[in-house]
Amino acid sequence: MGRVRVGVNGYGTIGKRVAWAIMKQPDMELVGVVKTRPSWEALSAVARGIKLYVPEGREKLFEEAGVRVAGTLQDLIQSVDVMVDATPAGVGASYAGIYRDAGVKAVFQGGERESVAEVSFNALYTYEAALGKASARVVSCNTTGILRVLYAFKKAGTVRSVRVTIVRRGADLKEVKKGPIEGLLLKPAKPPSHHAEDVRSVAGRDLDIVTYSIVAPTTLAHMHVMFVRFEGNVSKEDIVRAFEETPRIVLLKASIASSTAEVRELARDLGGRGDIYEVIVWPESLWVRGNEAGIAYMVHQEAIVVPENIDAIRAITGIVEDGARSIRLTDESLSIGRWLP
Ligand code: NAD
């Protein structure tokens, strides 16, 4: 197989970042993206030389706004091997049949129900299970963060139970109509939040996990506190080593930056756009006593699922059969893991 031809439906917070990441992969070609309206995001695609496709009947709207269109959604679907669907939560399901009927593979996002795709995806857990499948669902940003941190704990010992408190960003930067702008909101009031079931969809149905979710007035990032109980005692050194050895986790000393604001600003200072694809774990927050451990970490919601989408494309098309190799290729292309000197 030559380069995998990919289209992206929905060029918003996630879709645009996935599109840019596809452009950096040597084994993939971004054919184009679908926009429904000639918004500023459409202009940003044009500025980057990305071809715009629109749903049937919308061409005129773009023409009138002076935005050049390469074709319709159907034209794009006919020209690709994989569609990445990054339309708003729940909308992806309405496109699932269209991709399937066209014989095109599809990657969906975490806002969709589990049943939208054949497999729920995280590169560390379900790469092999996704090989050759027609569709995969990359689980949400919070779920991806939990899964990576849990993966490290599982390397250190046999995990019996997992408890997580999730402090979620209220909105993404561009979401001017979303809140809260004051107060912390317990959502849902009754645990577990949907993240627990989402983690199980990837890590296994028998995992004992409870999650609480609190929405906070911030756009910068999520912050979690996770407690795990192991079968037997586990040493702090073994846990730290497991974290160091797990891909897409960066240990950042709280003495350097302990707030989501400082970490996001540091990422911007280091160059590029400041997207943080890794989970940022604060080593000082690691607490261990006997068979219990706790840790705090941060998740940049706009970026963390981007490398997972890239790996999901490789898995369902089968162009790389080894998950670890795909992770290395993706991480190399996006400079993942290379943070501070
Ligand atoms: P978004 O609103 O930023 O982007 C969605 C894009 O789809 C927009 O460009 C919008 O114009 C377009 N769109 C709207 N209706 C459409 C339609 N009917 N057909 C085609 N395109 C349409 O949304 P987002 O935040 O990027 O979320 C996309 C998916 O990713 C959701 O499933 C969400 O749950 C998931 N996700 C979001 C985040 C996050 O923090 N924003 C993190 C992880 C996963």
Image: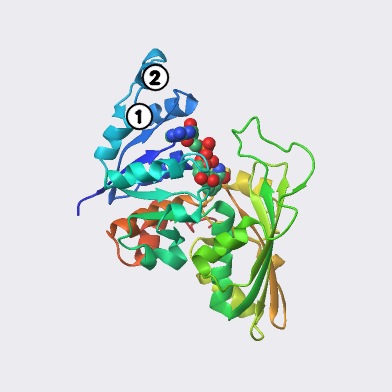
Q: Which residue is mark 1?
A: 52
Q: Nearer the viewer, residue 239 or 130?
A: 130
**26 displayed left or right of 332:** left
- The answer to whether any part of residue 12 appears in the image is no
Quarter holding residue 73: top left
Q: Which residue is mark 2?
A: 62
> Residue 15, how many percent across, how many down?
45, 41
Instruction: Estimate the x, y position of residue 62 in percent, counting from the top left.
Output: 39, 19
Q: Is residue 281 above or below residue 269?
A: below
Quarter containing the N terminus: bottom left
Q: Quadrant of residue 290?
A: bottom right
Disc 1 marks a residue whose amino acid type is: Leu
The outermost residue toward the top is 64
Q: Residue at x 61, y 46 (%)?
A: 264
| Residue 211 visible (yes or no) | yes
Gap between marks 2 and 1, in whole Å?
A: 10 Å
Residue 340 % position (x, y): 55, 56
Compare marks 2 and 1 and give the one earlier in the sequence: 1
Disc 2 secondary structure class: helix
Dot 2 surroundings within 10 Å: few (below 14), some, or many (20 or more)? Answer: some
Question: How many other residues sit within 10 Å of disc 1, few (<14), some (14-19) or many (≥20)?
Answer: many
**Is the C-beta separation of discs 2 and 1 under 8 Å?**
yes
For the point 51% across and 63% down, the residue is: 201
